[in-house]
Image: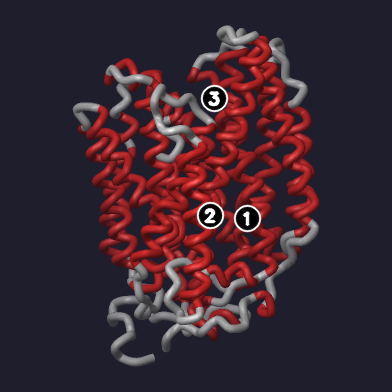
Amino acid sequence: MTDRLAPPTDSVPAVSPSTQHDAPASPWAEDPALAGRNRLVISLLLVSAFVVILNETIMSVALPVLMKDLDIAAEAAQWLTTAFMLTMAVVIPITGFLLQRFNTRPVFLAAMALFSAGTFISAMAPGFEVLLAGRVIQASGTAIMMPLLMTTVLNLVPPATRGRTMGNISIVISVAPAIGPTISGLILSVLDWRWMFWIVLPIAVGSLVLGFLKIPNVTEPRKAPLDVLSVILSAFAFGGLVYGLSSLGGESAEGAVPGWLPLVVGIVALAVFILRQVSLARREKALLDLRVFRSGTFSVAIAMLAISMMALFGTLIILPIYTQSVLGLSTLSTGLLLLPGGLLMGILAPFVGRIYDRFGPRVLLIPGSIIVSAAFWGMTLFTATTAWGWVLAAHITMSLGLALLFTPLFTAGLASLTPKLYSHGSAVVGTVQQLAGAAGTALFVSVMSARAIALSGGNAPSAVDTAGGIHAAIMYGAFISLAAIVISFFVRAPAQSDAPHDAVPAAH
């Protein structure tokens, strides 16, 4: 390594990518001091990522309160969630470039500074416009954190123990969104909505300060060109897709842009974006290097991850509607009802990681996909008079299945790439999460609404009509879940041969 690229003396030395990828264990694992610093870095990143991802769904049950307190319509309030998703979808594809071009420490500090600033602005917001701006700034930091966490783990953790660490990451990715509504419900039952931000702010600032004091540079940056046209295309492509899917899944204001228009713009922009990335990759100038899909394991894992995320976000939106609009439970009761499933995913994640390290992905993915499908088919039996205990049992079963899926999908998919493509693979995973989440929400809510209105004869749907709409939506999810069972048989443990052979090693 040249002196120009060597990290400062107070930082952890960067690992040669080729050595890290080929060796059975990281050379850092042999040095107890460095191993301790690595654990500190990953732990701090995990805590920070959990806090920032939690905010993606924490607003969902707070919208009625905000509508009343800020005197805004439902369509405006929904933008507090939609704008967050839009910002994530636009920023995440750029993180592949950011993580190549800059060191770990400044990227982490930028992410947590943005998130902390957005949280403070949201807590202090005098009205809707400032609150919306705060949410957008929050989302900008959130979008950077998850790819940073995944890329750092892939660079620091030896392949033999990656499953255990990725199990902890799956807590962040799956449990944080799942318990967001529960936490906001608990806060809103006793405190003002601003406390959703005031409670998070000290944790965010604490992570920022600890990161400033403790986080070293653990990756080796290289000169990566930024293609401005790709950034613009990316914004239209992923922003258009997420906004279009979100619009299809919600009630549009009269005179608003129809959901299909941004969807079409997004599809066209995505096609042009893909063609440009393929062309730029030949000159090592791609914003998002799509050669990650040359790995068969990565491609199959991404397909299954998309289905799993559709299931997670679809049920997160449909079950609260069912429990509140059909069964008549309160917001707090609904949050508490969904809490055991979220906690179960968190409890199981480390154990799932250990099983992956020992036995590989299929022993988890095949039963996990079957359990998720069984939960969906069980939920198709929900009626207007179903006891809440059955809803709890179905959600716990669904959570059990998803807990078996996320860790092996993240680990097998990303570990099948060469180190140079880690940052791009992490960005693809984050982008797919947002698109699949928006697609799942749109599918479930659109089918539910259409069926409920049809059953009501065009009148305001009754509880029975809504239950019929929810049944129709869950039936779609049940059939889609069958595809995940088939795909699970094709995910295998990553091998060196999975990685694209023409990938250029990172600079030494």
The correct choice, above or below, for 405 with respect to 123 in the image is: below
Task: Indicate the secondary structure of the residue bearing disc 3.
Answer: helix
**Residue 43 seen in the figure:** no
Amino acid beneath label 1: Thr
Q: Position of residue 327 (x, y in %)?
A: 62, 13
Q: Position of residue 82 (x, y in %)?
A: 42, 37
**Residue 380 seen in the figure:** yes
Q: Position of residue 141 (x, y in %)?
A: 34, 52
Please say if the residues under marks 3 and 2 sit with CB atoms less than 8 Å apart: no
Mark toward the start of the polypeptide (1 vs 2): 2
Quarter of the rendering occupied by the C terminus: bottom left
Q: Which residue is disc 3 drawn over?
A: 336
Please say if the residues under marks 3 and 1 sit with CB atoms less than 8 Å apart: no
The correct choice, above or below, for 23 with respect to 344 in the image is: below
On screen, residue 476 versus residue 89, left or right, reads right
Amino acid beneath label 3: Leu
Which residue appears farthest toward the bottom when viewing the image? 2
Quarter of the rendering occupied by the N terminus: bottom left
Mark toward the start of the polypeptide (3 vs 1): 3
Task: Indicate the secondary structure of the residue bearing disc 1.
Answer: helix
Q: Residue at x 56, y 35 (%)?
A: 441
Q: Which residue is disc 1 drawn over?
A: 407
Which numbered tag is attached to residue 332? Answer: none
Using a 10 Å C-alpha cutoff, classify the residue at mark 2 as few (fewer than 14 neighbours), some (14 to 19) or many (20 or more).
Answer: many
Q: Which residue is disc 2 drawn over?
A: 169
> Foreground: 84 or 57?
84
Mark toward the start of the polypeptide (3 vs 2): 2
Task: Indicate the secondary structure of the residue bearing disc 2.
Answer: helix
Cα–Cα span, label 3 and label 2: 23 Å
Mark whose residue sits in front, 3 or 1: 1
